[in-house]
Image (cartoon, helix red, strand yellow):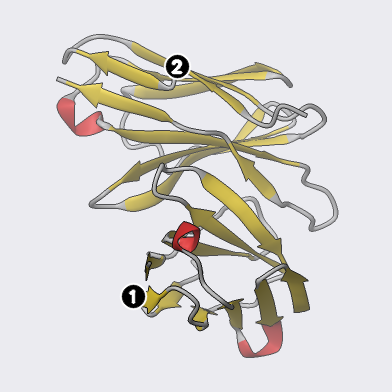
Amino acid sequence: DAGVIQSPRHEVTEMGQEVTLRCKPISGHNSLFWYRQTMMRGLELLIYFNNNVPIDDSGMPEDRFSAKMPNASFSTLKIQPSEPRDSAVYFCASSITSGGYNEQFFGPGTRLTVL
Amino acid sequence: GIQVEQSPPDLILQEGANSTLRCNFSDSVNNLQWFHQNPWGQLINLFYIPSGTKQNGRLSATTVATERYSLLYISSSQTTDSGVYFCIPYTGGFKTIFGAGTRLFVKA
């Protein structure tokens, strides 16, 4: 299996621009998680999906952030408009969640820089 | 929500030394996962361990859920072990909380 795939790996954009991050979970996994990592706040869970349905988006920092999972093999995290404080590494993870089992596997991350 | 405390926060080892990292958590858990974030930022699964002890090469982990802690043992440390070690205790739902991690540097 190729593991969790994220694209792009690096993104540099200017303040005010729209940014879209992409994630392909491991085939067969039914849960997907988006995380953000910064020096100041560490790793934070932004949102998670189960069977393509958003379960909890309480970690999403602002309305500028939105996430979708149109099917079991694809998810996006969008920031519109982007701000310099959004600069961080964004990780996607997936897992098989069943009967208490929920081992997560992480993608390589997208390093976002907003100028 | 569950609180996660990892210790020590920072650790410097001479190559070849052994070490124990600790993860304390405040609530009952039904599972726990250890990760290594290497210096390139990749998050690598080490163990998925609800209870008992597991071993993988030079690394082993023990979780005592009834006492709300888990330990990660690193034996004969190597420079490639450097990075940050995180534990995630799972309480049964989907929400995951990362601790601050233990930052390890292994000197050659």
The residue drawn where x is 69% and y is 31% is A3
* A77 in relation to B48, above or below: above
Q: Quadrant of residue A51?
A: top right
Quarter that holds the C terminus of chain B: bottom left
Q: Residue sitting at 71 percent across and 62 percent down?
A: B48
Chain of the residue displaying label 2: A
Residue A40 placed where, x, y %? 23, 52
Residue B1 relative to residue A93: left or right: left
Residue A8 numbered mark, or none: 2
The image shows residue A4, relative to residue B24, as above or below, that is above
Q: Chain of mark 1?
A: B
Relative placement, left or right, of B105 versus B73 is left
Q: Identify the secondary structure beneath mark 1.
A: strand
To which quarter of the image does residue B79 belong? bottom left
Q: Which residue is mark 1?
A: B12
Q: Amino acid at mark 1?
A: Ile
